[in-house]
Amino acid sequence: MTNEAAVDALLKQLTLEEKIKMVHANSSFAAGGIARLNIPELMTSDGPHGVRPEQGRDWKAVPDPNNAGTYMPTNNTLAATWNPELGYAYGAVLGQEANFRGKDIILGPGINIIRAPLNGRNFEYLSEDPYLVGQMAAGYIRGVQAQGVSACVKHYAANNQEWQRNKIDVNMSERALREIYLPGFQAAVQQGGAHALMGSYNKFRGQFATENAYLMNDILKGEWGFKGLVMSDWGSNHNTMDALRNGTDLEMGTDLVLKRNSVDQSATASTGAAAPAATKNIYDRFYLADAALEAIKQDPKLEPLLDDKVRRILRVMYATNMLDGKKRQPGAHNTSAHQATALKVAEEGIVLLKNNGLLPLKKTVKTVAVIGANATRENAGGGGSAQLQAKYEITPLQGIKNELGDKATVTYAEGYKVARGQKADPALIAEAVAAAKAADAVVYVGGYIHGYDYANWGQNAYDAEGIDKPDLKMPFGQDELVQAVLAANPNTVVVLLGGGPIEVAPWVGQANALVEAWYPGMEGGNALAHILFGDVNPSGKLPFTFPVKLEDAPAHKLGEYPSAPGDPLKQTYKDDIWVGYRYYDTYNVAPQFAFGHGLSYTTFKYSNLTVTPGPKSATVKLTVTNTGKTAGAEVVQVYVHDEQASVKRPEKELKGFKKVFLQPGQAQTVTVPLNAEAFQFYNEAKKQWVLEPGKFDVLVGSSSRDIRLKGSATL
Ligand code: NOJ
């Protein structure tokens, strides 16, 4: 972002009152707007997997034919592609639809580390691994911003659960912060060039994250040199002086402010209720509104703090051509190209977890029984602020019907009812078993759903903002159902939907094929059918570990999730850097499915590994060959292990990867450069990253637990 002279010139023309107007919201999703100087309002929209329907200026959903847009697969799916180019394509769709809808900032991507499997918002996030997060986020951000729209990376930082998200005070070691929780944000800023970041609701080391001196001033704007704008999450500011001093450049929100000021408790984001007329000037009561104006009037020495905020906002406006008289790019909406990108991301992101030769299903099947309520359920509208109105949504049942046309009979049995506390229903199970017995092949589609409706779901919601999952079990009595179906017909493929792992241990041994389909977006049903019937060879890989059971997860085993014993509003991440596979592999805990795992219909051979050391770096080279009969893609994963270190280091850490597409018999040389960062750890005593000389193992494989080649480099 350049144009500093123009920014300064414009800043000089603004009165104190006008500057204040620029740094807080004026309605649910808009801020600023100084007509006198042709400074437009800044229009934001969620995010992160499509452009949200109009919420109006007062959270009153506005009917608009353009509300129905492209519903991309959720960020889990994107991460599971391990394809940064698709990250770019995904971002480009969002940027173009944002332009079409007149939005300047997309509130995404969500990149918090997937630490606790129960976190209700994991479906919006990418991975348990900071390197994978950074690579995928950078692609997404560049894709959005290439359209002249800003991405707003969220939620900075340590917002790894929804439980008590507005109050929880997160503590962690400096090493965990640096090695696990920050690298994704740093990559988003430095590699992705993100124009904007959103501060999170939680506290960090005793101070609210959005106005946290250490996170905002020292690290983000200091060490990383971030020149863009930090906006609050909606209602995440709590103090005028902290917001002025510690990095909040733009205060957004409605509902929490209303609650806080006891003006009207009924107008909340979750109900979508309209704010009554009495609350008209609620925005003047924001921390960065009248209160900030008063503070600066009393102490003019504070004005440079305000100037810095306005500068950052203007910079972002210049970077997206909002101020230079250039017209906004027209954008595009619901194009077939956007739908094709949604399809592609789903096809590359769906993960084949287990296959005893059942998949791909033969297209000569005469009868396919589709079983499970998730086969007909639409998901776009769920989850909270990530909700969308999809132009259309191909469900799994529809996708299978599209695939088979009139060549086969597709039957459907609901199998289970989606309702709070719902137990197995013997009549529905009997119906499902009969359907399974009568079919050549069965596709069971179950797993989680988005539950966001508090009235119905209470503390039992899945994959929803503001609430964590109650457990990792198959809800609605599905364990019983799926076992009955598997017993009725061994040609049963189990397909799971949801924003993360689910306990499959009770029946996975019985299943001949298991597929993880996440929330695969508007083309999800087609993508799934393409994979089930072999039109597309699966190439997705898990971006996080599936534990055998919840209690195995390090946030539970070592950590204090969801809060410290005896203090519901505090939590120390005692799992430290032992997040995801770093824990499972180092502590020898067998996962159900490992990080990076994902099967293909073909086979790949890894050979000719060389690791050539350079100065504080190494170059990894190897050959990958498609040794099967089907074209396919493999994600070559490069992990590093430090043989000897002055601190305990993980058994392996992902430091590079490459997705390669190969025809049968084709071989390709893959080169993965490893820079100094690949070998360093964060030394708390020295307060810096260090590379301790010595021997490093370089492990190359198809998953974190399927290492095919080993080399080493002595640095
Ligand atoms: C709160 C959510 O945490 C954030 O992700 C979202 O962008 C805002 N609300 C606006 O809807």
Image: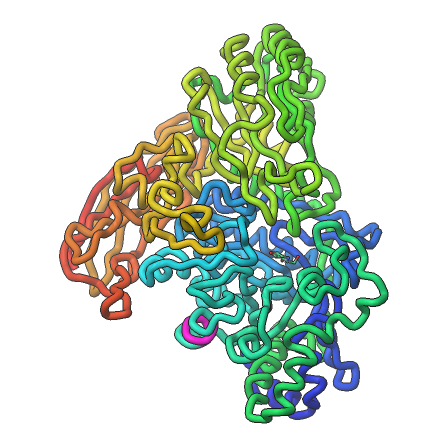
Which of the 4 image quadrants contains residue 268?
bottom right
Q: Main secondary structure of the magenta part?
A: helix
Q: Is residue 114 above or below residue 519?
A: below
- Residue drawn at (62%, 19%) of the image: 371
The residue nearer to you, when weighing 454 against 140, is 454
Which image quarter: residue 96?
A: bottom right
Tell me, yes or no, whether the highlighted magenta stretch contains residue 241: no
Instruction: State the residue in front, 391 or 263.
Output: 263
Magenta stretch, residue numbers: 216-221
User: Would residue 708 be found to the left or right of residue 508 on screen?
Assistant: left
- Residue 671: horizontal and vertical position, in percent? 32, 51
Placement of 230 over or under 570, stated as above or below: below
In this rendering, does residue 614 appear at all?
A: yes
Report x, y in % for residue 373: 65, 25
Q: Position of residue 659 (x, y in %)?
A: 42, 44
- Numbered circles on residues, count: 0
| Residue 403 appears in the picture as rendered | no
Q: Nearer the viewer, residue 482 or 566?
A: 566
Q: Is residue 225 left or right of residue 282?
A: left
The magenta stretch spans residue 218: yes
Q: Is residue 520 left or right of residue 571?
A: right
How far across and down, in percent of the image, does residue 633 sit?
A: 43, 38
Whereabouts is ligand 1, in terms of quadrant? bottom right
The quadrant of the rendering that contains the N terminus is bottom right
